[in-house]
Image (tube, rainbow, N blue to C red):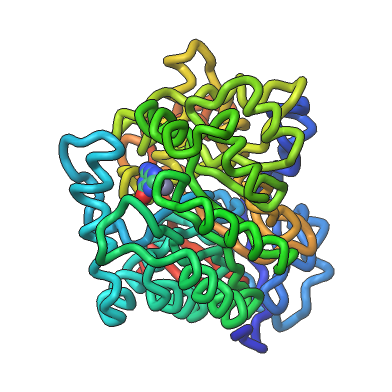
Amino acid sequence: MVNPMTELALRGAIYTLVADPFLNAASDCVVYEPDGCILIREGVIREVGAYADLRGKLPDDIELRHYPDAILMPGFVDAHIHYPQVEIIGSYGAQLLEWLNKYTFPAEARFVDDDHARRIADFFIDELHRNGTTAASVFCTSAPGSVDAIFEAAQRFNMLLLAGKMMMDSHAPANLVDTAQSSYDDSKALIERWHRRGRCLYSVTPRFALTSSPRQLELAGALMREYSDVRLQSHISEYRAEVARAAELYPERKNYTDIYEHYGLLDERAIYGHGIHLSEGELRRFHETGAKIAHCPTSNFFIGSGLFDIAKTKNEARPVTVGLGTDVGGGTSFSMLQTMSEAYKMAQLRGISLTATQCWYLATLGSAEALGLAEEVGSLQQGCDADIIVLDPRATPLLELRADVAESLDELLFALMICADDRAIAATYVAGERVYERDPST
Ligand code: GUN
Ligand code: ZN
């Protein structure tokens, strides 16, 4: 898939996070280069630094693309998203369990049709790129063909994608449930077919404890033991009625987290969506085992699930790694900019003002760390994959007016993450190839 011709240099301002600003001084976390240069070969960042320092090292015949008015940033990493739910985004009036039954399950049932799956998968990948998202952790449906469709679509762009077949054998409609054994067999076949094929990575994907029998969770744990570097994605403690139902279904377990831990599903390869209602003891187990949380604010507001407490979750005494997810179609936007804006507002409601640095971290390096991908993506450092976005801070009249009075980079980046959206993404590069350009004619 890698285009052998790809040697390319990008020039422009460069902004990247290199460490976690929740745990380190901001000045140790940010690298900013007002006139920078990124040298890319075979999809990888070979050199990055000031243009003045690098220009002498560039091969004479290299293609140099100059973005004088833009900021080059790492592509966004969406830590939690459901591609089969694209069509039901913005569905009215239901909270989690009703929303699943009324909108989500019927939409997911349509993915037994491979043509439908391919059509939505192609749309979905294009939409990610239009929004500057270059890597994502994606839930499919219980139909194995839905996994083939999304990996095939991602592979066309050599895009880093984690995905997995939804395992769900209980308390869901008959046209969607699998069995414990079929979910194991299908997941295993998909791992063999897709894991580490190009930039595809497999995530074992039990939907959540409410739709899995004990035997299915046991077999999910077996897959995690058999394949030492596949990931795991699921949901936890999103909504109070869900937490209560989990306790009813698994009365012998101490709490929701203990259900997953008991079946071998809580370790550094695991990422759980939401985690809004986790107790201090559960957060401690997340910290101790290295399990991660995907914070999905647009979804939490929209479905009415509750206010995630990011300060508590990242408590320096026992920090849990947190990434940022859109959770489309419970979430209401593909834009990680909009998602950062909602994360800021949610923290405000808890009396905490996240900094711009913290929010940009969550959407890039934080999500990469939460998915165990920080060596590859989430920052613009030598040796990382060349997943890069070109951000236009003056993309709309309002942003232009706002940028004119911004007195610092921090102020500019903060206003951008609050007010900008897909219109600010001027171009998106995946593994060194431009996969999206906002104004191809200009
Ligand atoms: N919990 C279990 N499944 C889902 C889902 O599809 N979306 C959300 N937001 N929460 C879930
Ligand atoms: Zn979800």
Q: Nearer the viewer, residue 272 or 218?
A: 218
Which residue sits furthest bottom?
4
Q: Please state the horizontal and vertical placement of residue 8, each as a whole percent of the image.
A: 66, 74
Is any part of residue 69 visible from this angle?
Answer: no
Tell me where residue 293 sits by quadrant. top right
Q: Nearer the viewer, residue 54 or 141?
A: 141
Residue lying farthest to the front in this orientation: 252
Residue located at (73% from left, 41% from top): 290
Question: Relative to the observer, which residue lies in front, 14 or 310?
Answer: 310
Q: Is residue 385 left or right of residue 243?
A: right
Q: Residue 379's x, y, as percent?
A: 68, 51
Q: Is residue 155 left or right of residue 394?
A: right
**Which quadrant of the figure contains the C terminus?**
bottom left
Residue at 41% x, 44% y is 210
The residue positioned 45% from the left and 78% from the top of the image is 148
In the image, residue 395 above or below residue 346: below
